[in-house]
């Protein structure tokens, strides 16, 4: 995401923000989570 997209997401998802999407009737939030695991290759 570019900086403008991150700022847009923060405005829509931050409680108290004038643009907070959950203040509108009929919206709900499903918060996806990404879990990544791995192993560092031996150098």
Image (cartoon, rainbow, N blue to C red):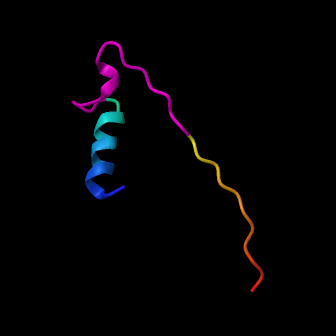
Q: Residue at x 27, y 43 (%)?
A: 8
Q: Measuring 64% from the left and 49% from the top, which residue is drawn there?
A: 35
Quadrant in the rendering for residue 22: top left
* Residue 35 magenta: no
Answer with left or right where residue 22 lies relative to residue 33: left
The percent coordinates of residue 42 (x first, y second) are 78, 81
Q: Pick out the residue farthest to the left.
A: 18
Residue 14 in picture, x, y percent from top left: 35, 35
State yes or no: residue 22 in magenta.
Answer: yes
State whether residue 23 is above or below residue 10: above
Residue 16's place in the image compared with 35, above or below, is above
Q: Is residue 32 left or right of residue 18?
A: right
At 75% from the left and 67% from the top, the residue drawn is 39
Residue 28, percent from left and from top? 42, 20
Q: What residue is drawn where x is 50% and y is 28%?
A: 30
> Where residue 38 appears, x then y in whole percent?
72, 63
Q: Main secondary structure of the magenta part?
A: loop
For the record, the magenta segment spans: 16-32
Nearer the observer, 11 or 30? 30
């Amino acid at each position: 995401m570019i900086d403008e997209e991150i700022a847009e997401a923060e405005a829509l998802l931050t409680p108290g923000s004038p643009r907070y999407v959950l203040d509108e009737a009929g919206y709900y939030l499903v918060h996806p989570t990404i879990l990544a695991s791995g192993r560092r290759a031996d150098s």
